[in-house]
Image (tube, rainbow, N blue to C red):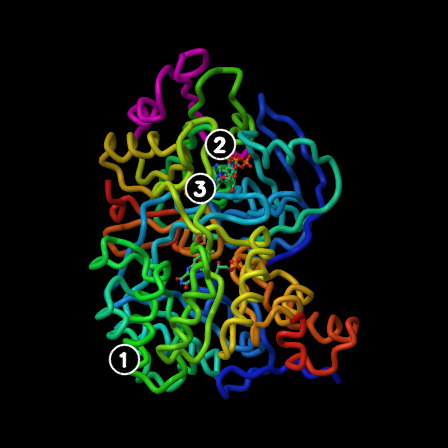
Amino acid sequence: MVDISTTLSGIKLDNPVIPASGTFGFGYEFADYYDINILGSISFKGTTAEPRFGNPTPRIAECTEGLINSVGLQNPGVEKVVNEELPHLAKFYKKPLIANISGFSLDEYKLCAEKMDAVDQVGIIEVNISCPNVHGGGISFGTNAAAAASVAKTVRSVTNKPVYIKLTPNVTDITEIARAVEAEGADGISMINTLLGMRINLKTKKPVIANKMGGFSGPAIFPVACRMIYQVYEAVNIPIIGMGGVRSADDVIELMLAGASAVQVGAENLVNPYACKDIIEALPEACEKYGINKLSDIIGGAH
Amino acid sequence: MNKGIYKIIENKCIAPMVYKMVLSGDVSHITAPGQFINIALEGFYLRRPISVHDVDREAGTVTVIYKVVGRGTEAMMNMTEGELDVLTGLGNGFDTSLSGDHAVVIGGGVGVPPMFLLAKELIAEGKKVTAILGFNKKEEIFCEDDFKAIGADVIVATADGSYGVKGFVTNALETVEAPTFYYACGPEPMLKALYNASELDGQLSFEERMGCGFGACMGCSCKTKYGNKRICKEGPVLRKGEIIW
Ligand SMILES: Cc1cc2nc3c(=O)[nH]c(=O)nc-3n(C[C@H](O)[C@H](O)[C@H](O)COP(=O)(O)OP(=O)(O)OC[C@H]3O[C@@H](n4cnc5c(N)ncnc54)[C@H](O)[C@@H]3O)c2cc1C
Ligand SMILES: Cc1cc2nc3c(=O)[nH]c(=O)nc-3n(C[C@H](O)[C@H](O)[C@H](O)COP(=O)(O)O)c2cc1C
Ligand code: FES
């Protein structure tokens, strides 16, 4: 029997497969399709202090082997998430959750982290730092090492739960950001978020997305994710949750070889609602094929 | 929702650049007219949402009618056999219990297809149905005879007056005697014109670019008077009174 379990900051996962934030709602709707308790964990929809409608539509543009989204963090706000969405999810999912939080100011990150800290089922707080800082001229927290570090420090100060900072790939040197958040006490890194992209409609001759630009993800970005995880693995000593274009058990193994301790699946859930289930079921056989007895042994094996 | 492999039984041209495709497979998840299916096409990352035109529960087939507007539908146009990975039973669909005894079903262009299954079900419930089918010109008309065959009164409106009533579906609606409710699907300007032109209550079906089609991504959200809704999940059909225009 192949052992496909893995560990994130002392939390044991039955397998490394986790649906990525924003592509799985608050999880329970997928319980109509399969038993979601098979999942390693769930990273639920990015939560902000206040309810957000998000960006105008169209929010979606198709790309070759991927899509651009500009949902704009639509979510019911942290109060409702904690009081309604998570209790509902708890009826279907019994394992530790990954709480994905977002903010447009340090205070907002702090508030969301405090609320999530109080939820027993939350195992890890995953901090999306790709949002623009309203007090910093709209520059994304995640593209500046000092700003990224300040988010890590703020969240760290209000919770004892493991804090994973989710990095944006839209930077010159991702290892610099990774080191900066590690220095402020981050327990782990989630990577990568979407790449900034654009499609133009040839008939209207205007961008497809109402907000013009959006986040590009899906299989097309897999090599970028793989490269960045490989680089960050060498730069820090904290675990990495890898993601970006994962759609098969082979992809999971590849990102773990690059340095990921667990793997998230994003866009693929949207085109195949059974994606995570299919990958989990295919993992033991894929491991056997590559002579792997214990999956966690291969983390960073490509180095 | 069901994810299944559906066999292409038929795919034929019924009007310029408009095709009718019959798929066989599990149709048990299709529970209401106005729902849609989401078709995966080889070489395209996202699925293509298309409304259910008809369901044959005994034969186990679902029929869609689509217009060729881009690369995905262009690829579909040339499929004569084989299998497709399809999600079925998506969206809320129309509610036939709202109709009263004289329902008007209104379709504009490729908004016509979903109105057929709706008309069929309303008629099966013993209601009078008037179907208003709007097209740009005579050559583009399809499905007129299908609606007649199930016993609906049919009014065709063409924008250029080359067939039937000259003008838009709103002009045709004015001529209908004692309607109790309307159901509509078509381009947004048509829906908006209907919304403004008539006092009658109704249900309207909307389109939006979709990431998933089953409620997971928030790609298709819209604001309504009763909160945010996902076109793919709480829609595509909205009640007139909740629409914000
Ligand atoms: C709920 C719903 C029901 C629909 N029912 C029908 C129907 O019965 N018959 C029919 O002909 N068409 C219908 N459409 C529109 C149909 O989905 C598009 O025409 C089709 O996706 C175009 O694909 P393409 O690759 O040819 O075009 P492209 O423009 O090349 O497609 C590029 C991307 O944009 C998306 N897209 C393009 N146009 C639309 C649109 N109008 N709505 C949503 N997404 C779009 C495509 O799905 C794809 O992801 C429906 C749309 C929705 C949302
Ligand atoms: C529709 C959509 C919504 C997303 N929303 C969020 C979000 O709320 N918070 C977040 O941290 N990442 C969000 N992401 C990014 C994903 O979690 C993931 O990092 C990225 O898409 C790369 O993985 P993939 O290629 O498997 O999709 C979103 C992605 C998509 C496609
Ligand atoms: S298209 Fe994904 S939620 Fe509607």
Residue carrying label 1: A114
Name the spot of residue B53 as percent of width and height, x first.
54, 40
Task: Name the residue beneath numbered marker 3.
Answer: A198
State which quarter of the image contains the N terminus of chain B: bottom right
Q: What amino acid is labelled 2 in the image?
A: Val
Q: What is the chain letter for disc 1?
A: A
CB at disc 2 and ligand 1 closer than 8 Å: yes
Which residue is under mark 2? B110
Ligand 2's quadrant is bottom left
Q: Amino acid at mark 3?
A: Met
Q: Nearer the viewer, mark 1 or mark 2?
A: 1
Q: Quadrant of the C terminus of chain B?
A: top left
Give the residue drawn at x 37%, y 35%: B104
Answer left or right for B32 relative to A285: left
Q: Mark 3 falls on what kind of element? A: loop
Q: Tell me what residue is drawn at x 50 percent, y 86 percent.
A: A11
Ranked by sequence position, the earlier of labels 3 and 1 is 1
Residue A12 versus residue B114 in the image, above or below: below
**Residue at 59% across / 37% down in the picture?**
B72
Q: Nearer the viewer, residue A258 or A264?
A: A258
Is B43 on the left-hand or right-hand side of A205? right
Q: Are marks 3 and 1 on the same chain?
A: yes
